[in-house]
Amino acid sequence: MRASEKAWIGLAAGVATYDILCPKGETLSERVDDWLEHPVHRVIALGAIGVTAAHLANILPDRIDPFHRLTTFKG
């Protein structure tokens, strides 16, 4: 299994574990729901979701993809 596959499994397991163990009303989805109710937070949340989805779908050019730009720090 590749390191990136292990990372995806860990990420999914972490989110699932948090959502199972978190206090009532504090799931990650519920927090995003709250952000979507406020105009400024809505723009930020939708922007972050959109950029993440565009990155994962490989539709952002590398020069404007913030996630790709982060990997350039590795050298």
Image (cartoon, rainbow, N blue to C red):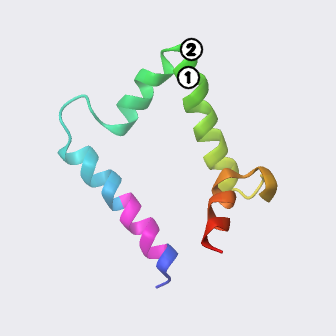
What stretch of residues is rendered in magenta?
5-12
Mark 1 — residue? 42
Contact (Cβ within 8 Å) of mark 1 with mark 2: yes
Coordinates of residue 9 in the picture (x, y in percent): 40, 68
Q: Which residue is mark 2?
A: 39
Task: Left or right? Give the position of 4 relative to 27.
Answer: right
Q: CA distance from mark 1 to mark 2?
A: 5 Å
Where residue 58 sits: x, y (%)? 74, 58
Left or right relative to 5: residue 51: right
Quadrant hosting residue 57: bottom right
Let me know if residue 61 appears in the view: no
Which residue is at a point 55% across and 31% down the rendered structure image? 45
At label 2, which amino acid type do we have? Answer: Pro
Residue ID at (63%, 56%): 67
**Helix, strand or loop status at disc 2:** helix
Amino acid found under the numbered disc labelled 1: Arg
